[in-house]
Image: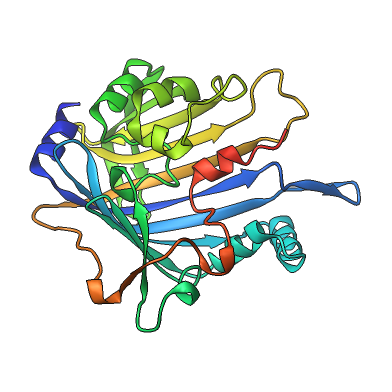
């Protein structure tokens, strides 16, 4: 807790790498007596900037992949049949970059480019909370009240170590493990409330987020893993979504400010080109449950 408050007070910027996957049960299906899973994989990298009360800005590049053969076949078939979600997801297998600053979200990439006027390369998509940093990762450990809640429910804590995505080995770190319901996380976390968009109902409130947090010896967050699943007991037969994300905080830097794109390159648009859906955060995946 104290280490995070020091980071917020110093208003530092940190280099971030994040990756994971999301399964959409509503789009998975059985074909020729074989279960086919609809899953997309994502990777994001860039920087997030802290302010006095939490994350205030970010500059992150993102790209989707369909690493499972059955998932790749499903999304291509659905897109060929004209399904707008599948078409949007396929376009997002090409790189997109988003900058969030002063509560505004800007994105450049092929999902938005064709909708922009000539000479403009950045879409102003509107307002966004929490610095736009929590769209794939469900846990914001830079919210002091959220971190306090998570640590109060920790059921596992020990000295540990890990190798990060750069190959560097970190020793003598602390590992905390726990789980929290959607209802409890919604109650305590502004980032999760913004992600869900509405209070979880009775079919979603008991769903769980399992989490793992690694810190250095001073308590500075180094890596966060989370797995969420909308399945709940008694919900057998109902399609459900699940997702996993790992976020690494690799290098802390002072006096680095995320800046918006040049105004001459920005245009306000209503949404992606061709009326396609955005489908670029796990909140949409959670809401995609079809009873």
**Residue 249 % position (x, y):** 28, 47
Query: Quick one: quadrant of the C terminus?
Result: top right
Foreground: 111 or 29? 111
Q: Residue at x 50, y 41 (%)?
A: 283
Name which quarter of the figure residue 286 lies in.
Answer: top right
Q: Is residue 88 above or below residue 289?
A: below
Q: Is residue 280 above or below residue 120?
A: above
In the orientation shown, which residue stands out farthest toward the bottom? 118
**Residue 281 % position (x, y):** 48, 48
Name which quarter of the figure residue 195 lies in.
Answer: top left
**Residue 277 % position (x, y):** 56, 57
Q: Tell me: 125 left or right of 4.
A: right
Foreground: 54 or 288? 288
Q: Residue at x 57, y 61 (%)?
A: 65
Q: Residue at x 35, y 23 (%)?
A: 188
In the orientation shown, which residue stands out farthest toward the right? 32
**Residue 21 % position (x, y):** 55, 48
Name which quarter of the figure residue 90 lies in.
Answer: bottom right
Q: Can residue 196 be seen by looking at this rendering?
A: yes
Foreground: 157 or 272? 272
Foreground: 14 or 11? 11
Q: Please name the colour scheme applied to the rendered image.
A: rainbow
Q: Is residue 249 above or below residue 90?
A: above
Q: Residue at x 62, y 38 (%)?
A: 241
Q: Is residue 30 above or below residue 117?
A: above
Q: Can residue 181 be seen by looking at this rendering?
A: no
Q: Tell me: 260 left or right of 116.
A: left
């Amino acid at each position: 807790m104290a280490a995070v408050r020091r980071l917020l007070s110093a208003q530092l910027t940190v280099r971030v790498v994040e990756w994971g996957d999301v399964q959409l049960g509503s789009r998975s299906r059985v074909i020729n007596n074989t279960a086919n899973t609809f899953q997309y994989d994502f990777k994001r990298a860039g920087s997030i900037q802290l302010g006095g009360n939490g994350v205030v800005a970010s500059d992150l590049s993102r790209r989707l992949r369909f690493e499972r053969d059955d998932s790749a076949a499903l999304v291509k078939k659905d897109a060929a049949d004209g399904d707008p979600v599948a078409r949007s997801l396929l376009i997002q297998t090409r790189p997109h970059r988003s900058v969030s600053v002063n509560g505004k979200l800007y994105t450049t990439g092929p999902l938005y480019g064709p909708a922009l006027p000539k000479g403009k390369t950045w879409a102003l998509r509107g307002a966004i909370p929490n610095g736009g940093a929590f769209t794939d990762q469900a846990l914001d450990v830079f919210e002091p009240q959220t971190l306090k809640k998570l640590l109060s429910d920790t059921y596992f804590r020990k000295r540990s170590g890990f190798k990060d995505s750069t190959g560097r080995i970190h020793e003598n770190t602390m590992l905390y493990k726990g789980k929290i319901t959607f209802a409890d996380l919604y109650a305590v976390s502004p980032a999760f409330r913004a992600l869900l968009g509405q209070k979880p109902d009775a079919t979603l409130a008991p769903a769980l987020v399992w989490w793992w947090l690694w810190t250095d010896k001073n308590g500075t967050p180094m890596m966060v893993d989370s797995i969420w699943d909308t399945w709940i007991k008694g919900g057998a037969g109902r399609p459900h979504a699940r997702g996993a994300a790992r976020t690494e905080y690799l290098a802390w830097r002072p006096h680095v400010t995320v800046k918006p794109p040049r105004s001459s390159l920005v245009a306000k648009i209503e949404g992606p080109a061709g009326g396609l859906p955005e489908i670029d955060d796990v909140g949409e995946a959670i809401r995609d449950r079809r009873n």
